[in-house]
Amino acid sequence: MIAGALLAAEEGFEAPHKFLPETYELLFGFIGFAVILTALIVFAGPVIKKALAARTQKIQDELDRSAAAKASAEAEAARVKADLAGAEAEAAGIVADARREAEQVKASQLALIDVELADLREKAAGELVAMRARSLSEVQGSIALRSIEAAELIVRRNLDQETQYALVERYIDQVGRMQGV
Amino acid sequence: MTTDHDRIAGYADALLVLARAEGNLDEVEDELFRFSRALEGSDSLRSTLTDPGIPAAKRQSIVEDLLGGRASNTTTSLISFVVGSGRSRDLPAIIALLVERAASEKSKVVAEVRSAIALTDDQQSRLTAALSQATGKSVAVKVIVDPSILGGVVAQVGDTVIDGSVVHRLAQLKTLL
């Protein structure tokens, strides 16, 4: 319209209204628009409506599937959560049992070790006593042997003729006092 | 069949008769007894006198050299006779039987006495009396000088031993300690 107004101004044509076109133009334009609109409503409307319905249905289906999946997932999550809770309880029970059993084993092992230690201590004490007695006996034996050797040496040195004679005399006296040998 | 025991008994009887015939039985008996103990105590003398590789004459010569001047002629001759007969190995048994029979003839039992020193006649006489009294038997004492007992006397009459030796006392002391 502006272009038309400008063109009319240049050509010296003067429009009836600055902004509004001619009435016939309005009429023809309106009729053309109505025809096209009708054609659109008649031919394209159902197609568009059907497409929109199909899309709506598709979206609704998607929404339904999603809702179902969500419900399923939530149910699964609940089940898993329940299972997990059960497993946790079971695990706690197993741990408690294991701990109790470990305590019992520990206590019995400690008792066993105590008994073994007492036994070992007793044996060690016995061996110590025996070893001490053996050592003492060996020392006494050694001392006795040395004493005998020393005594024999002293006796040999002191056994002069006079002593020998006295020993024989004493022997004769002792035998003379014996009866019924 | 003649057994070893019969043969030993035969030799013992023969030596006893010969010694008695010579008139010095007690002396010969003592000398034979001492020689017997010396033979038992000396491995070299025993092996020499029993060695079949050495001629009998040589063995008799050894005996005569060994006893010459230390024993009576009768004792030397009797031992030489047994050695010359090849019975050196049986000599201790022959002499033991001879001594036993000689004592038995006098109703006595033999008392083997070991002393570290030689006993005087008086001591032997008193010891004989003491042993007879102690055992209740009439004993004939045979003395052997044995320095290994160190001192004192050991007497054996049959199975009875009366040990008064120093070596025995030391052994007792050792046991006590």
Image (cartoon, rainbow, N blue to C red):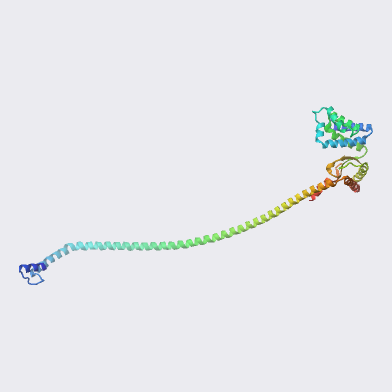
Tell me: residue A8, above or below residue B25. Answer: below
* Quadrant showing the N terminus of chain A: bottom left
Instruction: Give me the residue at 26% from left, 62% from top.
Output: A57
Instruction: Give me the residue at 71% from left, 54% from top.
Output: A132
Q: How many numbered marks appear?
A: 0
Decide if residue B36 is on the left or right side of residue A62: right
Instruction: Give me the residue at 18% from left, 62% from top.
Output: A44
Observer able to see residue A106: yes
Please provide percent x and percent y for residue B49: 82, 31
**Residue that lies at the very extreme toward the bottom in this rendered image:** A17
Residue B155 found in image quarter: top right
Residue A41 found in image quarter: bottom left
Q: Nearer the viewer, residue A40 or B93?
A: B93
Please provide percent x and percent y for residue A131: 70, 52
Decide if residue B57 is on the left or right side of residue A136: right
Q: Nearer the viewer, residue B169 or A90?
A: B169
Observer able to see residue B6: no
**Residue that lies at the very extreme toward the left in this rendered image:** A12
